């Protein structure tokens, strides 16, 4: 089943084209990795898919589960099953993790026509999900991402993912700023959430995370689009020869 | 005050526009009077208007004996500079030794040549500044400095104002500094006096920083203990221009440094930093008003003060951000130490913001030296007095670090 | 930003929901103000001679005063002769119990969510005094409170029944000479609440006064006096609404609080006077003088205010910290939208030794509104060990509003430590996007971010009030970006 289909997408920010004629199809149950050098615009791709307002699509199409993704508001995309784990999750002072997530979970339930959870029901759900990821109850009372370490932020993203159960999760540089132990926690968390119905798109510029979450497909991204696709071995090849050889190939 | 001196004859009364400007100064002074307790900008540093009656204007030409400070060019600073000397409120230079691209004229000469007309009294409203209005009524002494387009000065220009006798005298000094596009200059204003001199310096600088020009402006009000010093520096900064000011205030009856800065075009930036240290009975006042009138403008202020004895430190800072001046940044910080039972610190850091995409913050703290820090030093064998001095120095040094010019920094740190 | 604006604009611009008018016959005095009107008010209220004389003294002083203009407020001058200074729902005798209160009044308060029937009134956790136009119409739970010696009644009743207490404290915190509006209030105040907590008593329930302006063209001048004797405690809540009218209504109130040794008073306000319509037409002019004197050692006053209403707000709840070790706190959330203007803040006057004060002010401006935080921290020479911490944060929504911060700091004591911090910012696109990416709609996200911004203040409100206030904040900001 096709989850995400992107066709000839061209997009950018402030009249500068960053994504150029980009195409990709992701089926349920698959793990895709997009690899590319720093500054190639990989994050732009994730922002465009999630609908950040500064980014403008000039041509091309994208569907999530057959729905025209580009016509949807960011929150509709989220509620329709798209989750973006951000490279730099933003802090929202004064808003606790649990309060924030209660709003998010109930927004999704409302969208799906389910009754909203009351405080007690939600807390039960949140606590068990947090426990799975080794996140303390104390942490849930803190203001979201305020004063969090890099590892805490990423773990919080995975917690949100586990509660919102997206069909397609995009992990944008989920490994940045993490030591090896924190990276393992994140990878284990993500692996637990994998099913035959959902899919993962991992955006990264090196291999560390891919050693822990095995991709089915690896795409090399440069100059706004995919320049080569292959299986997990492509990532190893890349590690040995570097981006330069692939870029020269093009 | 104004009435008393009505019979004073100033140069150029026959030049209609100049007469008109002075007349406007007289009328404004008459209308608004001198600041009192209800004058918001002078809330903490106003004084009885009758005090002004004790000073007189000296209309005699520059005269001093050969031992006067003003003849010794090199005495002022340990580093090379282009010198402009004022002696008892009168320009004392007979000539200026200047590199190409820089012109300095006496104010009278600049008026006579027609250079000053486009700048004089054009950068602020007299109604808002009572002492500048008074200054305007009596303007005659001062210089006009022009740095030509693209000129980068190799050494600072030093204006050294020296007062060397004791008849209570008021000096209305008026300067114009124009930095044309992409020029770069450092101007130091250094005020000194014989220790027993009694006088009132009422200074107004009108500064025009044109596109991408850079001005470093250093002021050290090292006046005599019995002196009063009130200065207004009115600055217009155009596109990508930079105005950086550092003001140091030492002990005197009243030292007020007021900056009125308008960041008129995109990319304009300003800094006003300063230190004051008064250990006896004077009032030190740093007042700034920075108006962000265009997008992408930045301002920064750091003022550190120390007051002891019965002295009073005043910091008033207003950051104004106009509608549409988006993506501007304004930061303001005042920290003061109060070291005695009779000292006082008054602060009013003010934000006035009409645009939403801005980053602004201000902070103000005051208090005594930190007892824990003192104890820690004592426990390491440092005696209490030394420990206090170390902490005071550390407190002030943070502001000195804002000085870009290393020569000036070293000179001020050593002598302040 | 454009997107944020659009989504917010799409939101239903919920109208002021307290804007209805109660149709009730009113007993009023003629328009205008002179000594005869004051005498008439005093006669109607059956007041003792000393109070009439005090009113007249205030009135004569008021004639010598002019309206203050230092605030950053712009409004049509008030024609004080075009106002009516007394309006009371017509009833023959003062009701002895709630069953005698005019049913339309009870209905009015029900509509406002303030049930006056005791059995319904939040299961006995809140006692309410309801002030309708110029008079107090009902006070609940009086008997129960009386058992502990607590007096909670209208100030008119207190003047009759506890004249010694009133005479001793009235005007002792806010003298009639204090300022133009306070002076006017002293001359014409009609009703308000009176609270007396005797020595050693902890008031077992929240005391609440609910102010309602109803009659047209009437100024409301209420006066609240709270006295907390040694070792006592009370938490007091105040709520305000007014009908939606095209003309501006004047509200000039005074709150005086006296806090004695070891006593503590918590005063919370949710001010939701009619703010005018989206074009700035109508709305209440709110000129209020609130001041607490911490006279006793170790006494404490805490002001918490959530201000969403009024066309014009001029209000500076203050703390005079006279007693050694006394504590003053000010927590404020002010939200202005459309053409509202607010100039508000606090004064912390440190007179006693080791006095401490804390100011947390959160201002949110939207639409074409303008908001100013104006505060004073003043440390007297003898106030050894005084401490103040002030934090004033402003959030701007949209580019047509203004936000200003004017803190005055005056320190004459070297052992005092004063800290002030202020920031101004907007809701960042990143924060909004993050919420949206998690499925939270833009309007809900703005509400969430704003309530996070206000959290430190909101958590100081009593529970029942906090929920109300949180809702109010969301409603006030709907359609806030234009």
Image: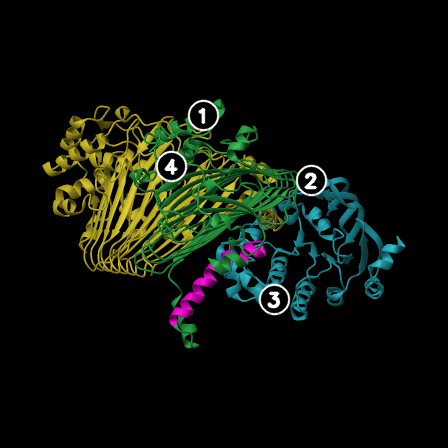
Measure how far apart labels 1 and 2 are at the Cα level: 74 Å
Q: Chain of mark 2?
A: A
In the picture of the structure, the residue carrying the numbered disc 2 is A71
- Looking at the rendered image, the disc whose residue lies closer to the viewer, 3 or 1, is 1
Measure how far apart labels 3 and 2 are at the Cα level: 35 Å
Quadrant of residue B324 within the rendered picture: top right
Residue B240 versus residue A222 in the image, above or below: above
Q: Is residue B400 magenta?
A: yes
In the picture of the structure, the residue carrying the numbered disc 1 is B13
* Label 1 crowd (10 A; few <14 / some 14-19 / many >=20): few
| Rendered location of residue B310, percent (x, y) | 31, 55
Taking C170 as reference, is A7 left or right?
A: right
Disc 3 element:
loop
Between residues A83 and B402, which one lies in front from this camera angle?
A: B402
* Colour of chain A as rendered: cyan
Q: Chain of mark 4?
A: B
| Rendered location of residue B240, percent (x, y) | 62, 41
The residue that appears at 49% across and 24% down in the rendered structure is B17
Magenta segment: B384-409
The residue that appears at 40% across and 35% down in the rendered structure is B59
Q: Which chain does the green colour mark?
A: B
The figure's colour scheme reads by chain
Q: Which chain does the yellow colour mark?
A: C
Q: Which mark is residue B57?
A: 4
Q: Are marks 1 and 4 on the same chain?
A: yes
- Looking at the rendered image, the disc whose residue lies closer to the viewer, 1 or 2, is 1
Q: Are marks 1 and 2 on the same chain?
A: no
Q: Please tell me whether the stretch drawn in magenta is mainly helix, strand or loop.
A: helix
Q: Which mark is residue A133?
A: 3
| Rendered location of residue B328, percent (x, y) | 56, 43
């Amino acid at each position: 089943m096709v989850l995400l289909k992107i066709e000839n997408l061209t997009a950018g920010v402030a009249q500068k084209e960053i994504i150029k004629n980009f195409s990709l199809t992701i089926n349920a149950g698959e793990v895709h990795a997009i690899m590319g050098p720093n500054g190639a615009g990989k994050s732009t791709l994730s922002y465009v898919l999630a609908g950040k307002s500064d980014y403008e699509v000039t041509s091309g199409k994208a569907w999530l589960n057959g729905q025209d993704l580009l016509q949807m508001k960011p929150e509709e995309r989220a509620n329709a099953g798209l989750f973006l784990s951000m490279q730099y999750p933003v802090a929202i002072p004064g808003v606790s993790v649990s309060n924030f997530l209660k709003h998010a979970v109930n927004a999704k339930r409302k969208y799906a026509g389910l009754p909203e959870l009351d405080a007690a029901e939600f807390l039960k759900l949140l606590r068990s999900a947090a426990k799975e990821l080794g996140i303390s109850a104390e942490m849930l009372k803190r203001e979201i991402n305020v004063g969090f370490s890099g590892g805490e932020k990423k773990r919080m993203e995975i917690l949100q993912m586990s509660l919102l159960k997206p069909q397609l999760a995009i992990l944008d540089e989920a490994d940045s700023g993490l030591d090896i132990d924190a990276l393992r926690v994140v990878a284990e968390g993500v692996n637990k959430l994998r099913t035959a119905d959902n899919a993962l798109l991992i955006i990264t510029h090196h291999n560390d995370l891919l050693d822990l979450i095995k991709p089915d497909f690896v795409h090399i991204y440069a100059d706004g689009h995919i320049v080569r696709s292959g299986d997990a071995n492509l990532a190893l090849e890349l590690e040995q020869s570097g981006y330069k050889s692939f870029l020269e190939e093009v | 005050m104004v009435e008393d001196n009505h019979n004073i004859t100033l140069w150029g009364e026959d030049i209609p526009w100049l007469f008109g400007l002075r007349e406007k100064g007289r009328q404004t002074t008459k209308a608004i009077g001198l600041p009192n307790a209800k004058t918001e900008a002078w809330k903490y540093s106003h004084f009885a208007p009758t005090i002004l009656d004790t000073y007189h204007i000296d209309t005699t030409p520059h005269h001093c004996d050969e031992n006067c400070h003003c003849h010794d060019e090199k005495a002022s600073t340990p580093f090379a500079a282009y010198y402009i000397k004022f002696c008892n409120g009168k320009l004392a230079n007979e000539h200026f030794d200047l590199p190409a691209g820089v012109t300095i004229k006496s104010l009278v000469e600049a008026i006579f040549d027609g250079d000053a007309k486009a700048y004089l009294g054009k950068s602020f409203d007299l109604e808002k500044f009572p002492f500048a209005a008074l200054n305007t009524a009596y303007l005659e002494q001062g210089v006009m400095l022009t740095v030509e387009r693209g000129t980068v000065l190799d050494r600072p220009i030093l204006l050294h104002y020296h007062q060397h006798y004791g008849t209570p005298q008021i000096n209305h000094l008026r300067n114009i500094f124009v930095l044309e596009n992409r020029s770069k200059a450092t101007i130091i204003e250094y005020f000194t006096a014989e220790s027993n001199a009694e006088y009132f310096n009422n200074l107004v600088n009108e500064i025009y920083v044109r596109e991408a020009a850079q001005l470093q402006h250093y002021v050290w009000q090292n006046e005599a203990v019995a002196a009063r010093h009130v200065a207004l520096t009115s600055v217009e900064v155009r596109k990508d221009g930079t105005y950086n000011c550092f003001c140091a205030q030492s002990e005197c009856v009243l030292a007020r440094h007021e900056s009125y800065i308008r960041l008129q075009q995109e990319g304009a930036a300003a800094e006003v930093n300063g230190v004051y240290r008064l250990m006896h009975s004077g009032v030190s006042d740093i007042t700034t008003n920075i108006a962000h009138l265009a997008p992408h403008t930045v301002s920064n202020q750091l003022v550190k003060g120390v007051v002891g004895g019965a002295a009073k430190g005043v910091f008033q800072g207003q950051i104004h951000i106009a509608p549409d001046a988006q993506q501007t940044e304004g930061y303001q910080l005042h920290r003061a130490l109060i070291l005695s039972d009779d000292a006082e610190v008054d602060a009013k850091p003010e934000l006035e913001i009409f645009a939403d995409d801005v980053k602004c913050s201000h902070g103000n703290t005051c208090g005594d030296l930190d007892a824990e820090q003192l104890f820690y030093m004592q426990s390491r064998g440092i005696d209490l007095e030394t420990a206090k001095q170390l902490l005071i120095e550390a407190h002030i040094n943070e502001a000195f670090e804002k000085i870009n010019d290393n020569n000036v920094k070293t000179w001020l740190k050593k002598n302040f | 930003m454009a997107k944020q604006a659009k989504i917010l604009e799409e939101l239903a611009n919920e109208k002021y929901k307290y804007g209805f008018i109660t149709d009730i016959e009113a007993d009023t005095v003629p328009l205008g103000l002179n000594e005869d009107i004051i005498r008439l008010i005093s006669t109607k209220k059956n007041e003792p001679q000393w109070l009439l004389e005090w009113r007249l003294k205030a009135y004569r002083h008021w004639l010598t005063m002019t309206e203050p203009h230092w605030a950053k407020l712009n409004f049509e001058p008030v024609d004080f002769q075009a106002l009516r200074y007394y309006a009371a729902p017509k009833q023959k005798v003062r009701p002895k119990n709630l069953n005698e209160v005019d049913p339309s009044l009870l209905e009015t308060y029900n509509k406002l969510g303030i049930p006056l029937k005791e059995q319904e009134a939040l299961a006995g956790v809140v006692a309410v005094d309801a002030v309708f136009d110029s008079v107090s119409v009902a006070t609940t739970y009086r008997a129960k409170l009386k058992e502990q010696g607590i007096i909670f009644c209208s100030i008119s009743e207190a003047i009759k029944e506890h004249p010694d207490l009133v005479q001793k404290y009235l005007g002792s915190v806010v003298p009639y000479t204090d300022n133009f509006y306070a002076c006017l209030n002293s001359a014409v105040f009609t009703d308000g609440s009176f609270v007396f907590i005797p020595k050693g008593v902890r008031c077992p329930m929240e005391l609440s006064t609910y102010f309602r302006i109803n009659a047209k063209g009437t100024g409301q001048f209420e006066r609240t006096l709270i006295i907390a004797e040694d070792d006592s405690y009370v938490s007091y809540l105040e709520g305000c609404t007014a009908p939606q009218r095209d003309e501006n209504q004047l509200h000039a109130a005074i709150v005086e609080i006296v806090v004695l040794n070891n006593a503590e008073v918590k005063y919370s306000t949710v001010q939701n006077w009619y703010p005018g319509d989206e074009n700035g037409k109508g709305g209440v002019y709110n000129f209020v003088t609130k001041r607490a004197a911490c006279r006793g050692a170790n006494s404490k006053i805490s002001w918490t205010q959530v201000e969403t209403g009024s066309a014009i707000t001029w209000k500076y709840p203050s703390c005079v910290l006279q007693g050694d070790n006394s504590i003053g706190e000010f927590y404020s959330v002010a939200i202005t939208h459309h053409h509202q203007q607010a100039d508000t803040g606090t004064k912390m006057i440190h007179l006693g030794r080791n006095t401490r004060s804390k100011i947390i002010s959160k201002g949110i401006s939207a639409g074409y509104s303008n908001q100013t935080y104006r505060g004073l921290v003043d440390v007297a020479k003898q106030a050894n060990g005084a401490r103040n911490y002030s934090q004033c944060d402003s959030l701007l929504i949209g580019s047509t509003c203004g936000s200003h911060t004017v803190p005055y700091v005056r320190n004459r004591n070297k052992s005092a430590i004063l800290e002030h911090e202020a920031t101004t910012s907007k809701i960042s696109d990143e924060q909004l996007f993050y919420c949206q990416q998690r499925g939270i709609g833009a309007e809900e996200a703005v509400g969430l971010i704003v309530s996070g911004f206000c959290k430190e203040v909101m958590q100081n409100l009593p529970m029942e009030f906090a929920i109300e206030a949180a809702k109010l904040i969301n409603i006030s900001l709907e359609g806030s970006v234009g």
